[in-house]
């Protein structure tokens, strides 16, 4: 959304930035203390870590979402749209389908994340039947987060370039059509998270 449409949220954004800086400093202190206890060097408990190393270690240790970019780390942006694609494996091909998606779809999605097309891409395996009928069986869900509400339509030209460069890696000599099929798709708009 354009900053002028935010209903005064610029003040809140500034306050959130200041608060986040305070949290990062607190995390840096905690990480220094923990690493000093675990790895004291010749100078006693003084640990020779850069501010970047401490920030990265703190973010990863505390489970904050991060994505490595070149030599730095940035916080993963929140998606404006989530797209879930439902997959059903052909008989006896469940594991092979999951491996195919990992080697091919997620490989292309990783490049899309690096180029800023997506916030994330995740392969989820269904582990329980729940309340789904046998006819509606789903084996995997691929979830992709988009930065814009337009989703794939906003990034299709750039993603087609990635797809054209990617060479499909068969699993057990088989490609997607031999392993399974798409049985549905759902678009979701994130509303709130904890």
Image (spheres, grey):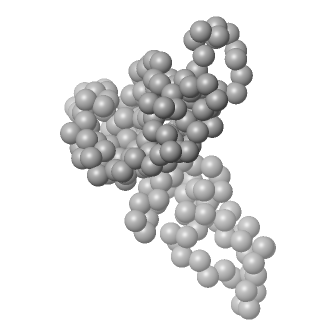
Which residue is located at x 57 percent, y 11 percent? 136
Is residue 71 visible to the viewer in this orientation of the structure?
yes
**Quadrant of image for the N terminus:** top left
Q: Quadrant of residue 186?
A: top left
**Quadrant of image for the C terminus:** top right
Q: Nearer the viewer, residue 110 or 91?
A: 91
Instruction: Find the residue positioned furthest to the front.
Output: 173
Which residue is located at x 35 percent, y 47 percent? 112
Q: Position of residue 105 (x, y in %)?
A: 43, 41
Apparent side of residue 146 relative to residue 192 in the rendered image (left or right): left
Q: Nearer the viewer, residue 146 or 77?
A: 146
Is residue 194 visible to the viewer in this orientation of the structure?
no
Which residue is located at x 32 percent, y 29 percent? 151
Q: Position of residue 158 (x, y in %)?
A: 24, 44
Q: Nearer the viewer, residue 64 or 153?
A: 153
Apparent side of residue 94 relative to residue 113 in the rendered image (left or right): right
Vertical side of 184 occupied by 77: above or below: below
Apparent side of residue 61 relative to residue 76 in the rendered image (left or right): right
Which residue is located at x 61 percent, y 60 percent? 58
Vertical side of 118 occupied by 148: above or below: above
Apparent side of residue 38 relative to residue 155 in the rendered image (left or right): right
């Amino acid at each position: 959304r354009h900053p002028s449409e935010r209903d005064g949220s610029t003040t809140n954004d500034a306050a959130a930035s200041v608060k986040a800086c305070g949290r990062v400093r607190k995390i840096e202190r905690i990480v220094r203390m923990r690493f000093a206890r675990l790895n004291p060097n010749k100078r006693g408990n003084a640990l020779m870590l850069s501010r970047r190393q401490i920030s990265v270690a703190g973010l990863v240790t505390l489970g904050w979402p991060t994505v490595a970019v070149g030599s730095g780390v940035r916080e993963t942006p929140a998606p404006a749209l989530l797209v879930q694609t439902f997959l059903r494996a052909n008989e006896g091909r469940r594991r092979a389908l999951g491996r195919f998606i990992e080697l091919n779809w997620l490989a292309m999605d990783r490049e899309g994340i690096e180029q800023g097309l997506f916030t994330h891409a995740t392969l989820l395996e269904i582990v329980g039947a729940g309340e789904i009928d046998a006819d509606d069986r789903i084996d995997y869900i691929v979830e992709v987060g988009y930065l814009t509400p337009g989703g794939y339509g906003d990034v299709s030209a750039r993603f087609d370039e990635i797809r054209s460069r990617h060479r499909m890696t068969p699993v057990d000599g088989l490609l997607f059509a031999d392993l399974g099929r798409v049985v549905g798709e759902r678009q979701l708009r994130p509303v709130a998270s904890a």
